[in-house]
Amino acid sequence: MTPLCVDCDGTLARVDLFHEALLRVLKQQPWLIFPMIGWLLAGRAAFKARIAAMAPLNPEVVPLREEVLAQIETAKAAGRPVVLATAADRTHAEALARHVGYFDDVIASEGATNNASHAKATALVERYGEGGFDYIGDSKADLAIWSRARRSLSVDSRKLRGQVRRAGLQVEVVARKPETARALAKAMRPHQWLKNGLVFLPPLAGHRFELDVLVQALLAFVAFSLCASAVYLLNDMLDVDADRRHKRKRNRPFASGALSISVGFKAVPLLLLASLAIAILLGPLFTAVLVGYGIATTLYSFKLKQQVIVDVILLAALYTVRIAGGAAATGVVPSFWLLAFSMFIFFSLALVKRYSELRPLLTSSEGMLAGRGYQASDLPVLMAAGVASGMNAVLVIAFYVDSETTRAMYPSTAAILLVPALILYWVARLWMKTHRGEVHDDPVVFAAKDWQTLVISAFIGLLFAVAGTSWFVGF
């Protein structure tokens, strides 16, 4: 019977096995990026074999495409041979084939042969004859194989559709890939740009509302947002294995296979360059702050996220760095009160994030948080530290309300006497909901969607605005 030959990368697997193995090696040994240039000179197949030996495949975490699995199951039920025909290294291909369990044979890259495109087409024709096999693929490299197959099937994409049409081939679509642009936009997490609004705090707290100052703050916001998105992409790329074992994070674009690692390799440097270009426009001081932010977040992604307590201290510091960035861009020096408040409140929020990630372990068989150094038994300590830090933030704002600095800036401080009580309520409520499991991973996302947080924030802004008006004096 006519065999069904199935491509691996992007077809059966939603991801590219080589790209993910390469990333695992670089995550553990980033200094190897330079000798890898020499390894590549030995040929693509040899390079793949070397990377595969350094990063063995765990097939259990590879996301598979259900529609392709259905085609394989149908072929097996009909008694047809099923062959995994891939450009992946043989060790990776055979590991995945054993895990899936349906394959009768594996044709893969090995020795000096990179089993892609024309090389794969030649291997299949030599084994099964011209038009003696059906083939499922997903990319331009598969055009050479479809032209020699009996029946051509594809995992379609907009780009591939045009290539197939220009080649004059008849290809049956069995599945469609998600749109890359949409998946990339999701992976960049634009909702997280809300955090970068902290760059506006120095001019707002300093009552500097000139147009040029606000434009500088806006440019700083864009620079931080682009840099942060680059880091989010890098962080998700490095975390794919851990994310695939997580109940919610497995649906992230890289973890689910909706976005390929190769796109991430291209997008990260482009975003960083755009961010740096804007930073240079804002001057050397802001550039230094942004570069420091980028270095710190990269260290977090590669190593520091695994260090207990160090990770949350760094997360809190990165919030405060955004305030420093706003000050560097606008020339408005933040007060001691603003920096002290931000240190305590953001440390509390960082602990909320870690607590909410750790809490599901109470009802699971896992004792450790994947990719982190925390245990389920650490939850009481995290809550104690987080609540204490939040209360310290309330204390700082209470002292600020009655300080000489505040009395010099506002005609009357009576209007803002309620602010500490409002923040006290918000912090206590946030931790109560976190303890109940009602805050999922990121407190900033929770705050942006929580109606009480929005109302409290608007009311606090109104109180400060009222305190700044002369008609309130005497109340």
Image: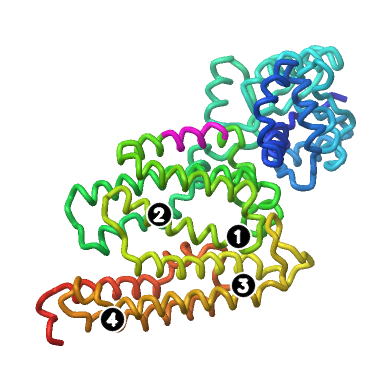
Residue wearing tag 1: 310
| Residue type beneath disc 3 | Leu
Residue wearing tag 3: 382
Q: Is residue 387 magenta?
A: no
Q: Is residue 271 magenta?
A: yes
In the displayed structure, does residue 282 sit left or right of residue 321? left
Residue wearing tag 4: 402
Q: What element does badge 3 sit on?
A: helix
The structure residue drawn at horizontal position 58% and vertical position 47%, both measured from the top left corner, is: 299
Q: What element does badge 2 sit on?
A: helix
**Quarter the C terminus occupies:** bottom left
In the displayed structure, does residue 358 sit left or right of residue 215? right
Q: For the stretch drawn in magenta, what is the main secondary structure?
A: helix
* Span of residues in magenta: 265-273
Where residue 37 appears, x then y in whole percent? 67, 21
Residue wearing tag 2: 322
